[in-house]
């Protein structure tokens, strides 16, 4: 999971480079690109780094600012980003435009969508005050989904779902929690994952952003300006339930269910009116969103554990209680998921008494 560029700290005269050769390549690229695009090299400063190996710089130009992406080609493939940026533009979605790209070196010049993410302008203690922002996000999502065509983006198929779900036992349970998965646990995980995959693949396919959440949406100066959409390089073609689940069940932000229902119903109504395949029964659609959200949070738990243990980025695990809560809440609602609920509670050391006063068996 990546993080959109955020407001920079005070301008830094020097950008740090761990590889002197890459620093020299960048200096040459920047000199040539600055001449062609009217950039001011002396204004270069760090905008953000994300959960991958990408970094973003902000630089002034004659008519505003631009974003530079530093994506080492041996670690990051930027071709999907360029492809999806083109698809976003064709869909009428406000995303960054690629102005220059040195594919062999992995340097890219982009339009700048601003310095404030939706996350930064959200009013956390007043959900309804954020409704206009969320409806902007809904409009952008529907425009993106309406442009969908099969065979254009990689499929979000059973194989990919299985790989993502495997992150939970491999990285979260085994490596982060230090729990040895015995045969009974493995059987529970396997059976639960089969149910999750079956439910999620039963929904029609559309373009899926895959990280459609406030951290990756850029707020305009006014509500008249569309939200900018970032971090779309992992887009796929998959279940229509995914992106609305991502938006309303954010790994970094929690809302009460009334607000989640309100926005999801508004999305469903608009999507249905636009002809998107969300079905005629909102209850059924909401169940689909819950099952898709469950898959996402099992995956996220594994990814955040991997970021900590493999990549030395422990800050992501601070949000562990949030997505464990999401997982437990969804599992509590569905009979097929009760064994998974008991497994998660055992791993987390949570003892929940039943109605007779005894612990769960």
Image: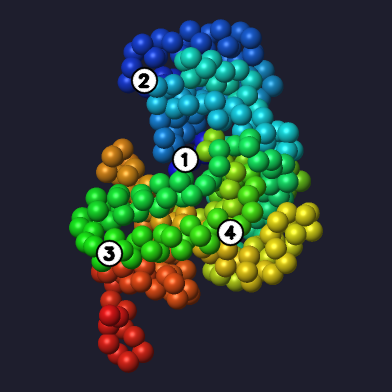
The answer for how far apart the CA atoms under marks 3 and 2 are is 45 Å
The answer for how far apart the CA atoms under marks 4 and 1 are is 28 Å
Vertical relation: 31 (above or below) 202? above
Residue at point 58%, 15% (across, down):
40
Residue at point 36%, 57% (across, down):
320
Residue 265 is situated, as x and y percent measured from the top left of the image, at 68, 65
Q: Nearer the viewer, mark 2 or mark 4?
A: 4
Q: Foreground: 23 or 308?
A: 308
Residue 44 is situated, as x and y percent measured from the top left of the image, at 51, 21
> Can you see residue 128?
no
Label at residue 24: none
Q: Nearer the viewer, mark 2 or mark 1?
A: 1
**Label 3 element class:** helix
Q: Foreground: 191 or 210?
A: 191
Q: Foreground: 117 or 94?
A: 94
Residue for badge 3: 185
**Label 4 element class:** loop
Vertical relation: 266 (above or below) 103? below
Vertical relation: 358 (above or below) 229? below
> Can you see residue 271?
yes
The answer for how far apart the CA atoms under marks 2 and 1 are is 20 Å
């Amino acid at each position: 999971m990546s993080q959109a560029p955020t407001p920079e700290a005070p301008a830094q005269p020097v950008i740090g480079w761990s590889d002197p050769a890459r620093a020299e390549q960048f200096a040459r690229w920047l000199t040539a690109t600055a001449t062609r695009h009217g950039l001011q090299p002396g204004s270069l400063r760090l905008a953000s780094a994300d959960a991958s190996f990408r970094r973003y710089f902000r630089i002034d130009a004659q008519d505003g600012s631009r974003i530079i992406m530093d994506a080492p080609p041996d670690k990051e493939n930027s071709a999907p980003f360029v492809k999806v940026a083109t698809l976003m533009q064709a869909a009428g979605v406000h995303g960054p435009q690629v102005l220059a790209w040195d594919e062999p070196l992995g340097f890219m010049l982009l339009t700048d969508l601003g310095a404030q993410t939706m996350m930064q302008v959200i009013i956390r203690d007043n959900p309804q005050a954020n409704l206009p922002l969320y409806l902007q996000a809904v409009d952008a999502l529907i425009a993106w989904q309406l442009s969908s065509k099969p065979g254009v983006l990689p499929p979000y198929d059973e194989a990919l779902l299985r790989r993502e779900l495997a992150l939970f036992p491999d990285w979260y349970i085994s490596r982060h929690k230090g729990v040895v998965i015995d045969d009974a646990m493995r059987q529970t995980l396997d059976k639960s994952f089969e149910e999750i995959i079956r439910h999620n693949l039963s929904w029609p396919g559309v373009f899926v952003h895959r990280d459609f959440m406030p951290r990756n949406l850029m707020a305009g100066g006014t509500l008249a300006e569309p939200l900018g959409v970032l971090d779309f390089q992992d887009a796929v073609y998959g279940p229509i339930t995914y992106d609305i689940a991502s938006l309303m069940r954010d790994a970094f932000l929690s809302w009460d269910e009334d607000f989640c229902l309100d926005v999801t119903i508004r999305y469903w109504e608009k999507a249905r009116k636009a002809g998107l395949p969300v079905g005629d029964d909102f209850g059924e659609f909401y169940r689909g969103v819950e099952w898709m959200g469950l898959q996402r949070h099992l995956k996220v738990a594994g990814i955040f554990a991997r970021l900590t243990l493999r990549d030395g980025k422990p800050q992501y695990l601070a949000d562990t209680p949030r997505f464990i809560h999401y997982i437990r809440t969804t599992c509590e609602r569905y009979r097929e998921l009760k064994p998974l609920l008991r497994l998660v509670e055992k791993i987390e050391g949570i003892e929940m008494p039943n109605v007779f006063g005894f612990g769960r068996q």
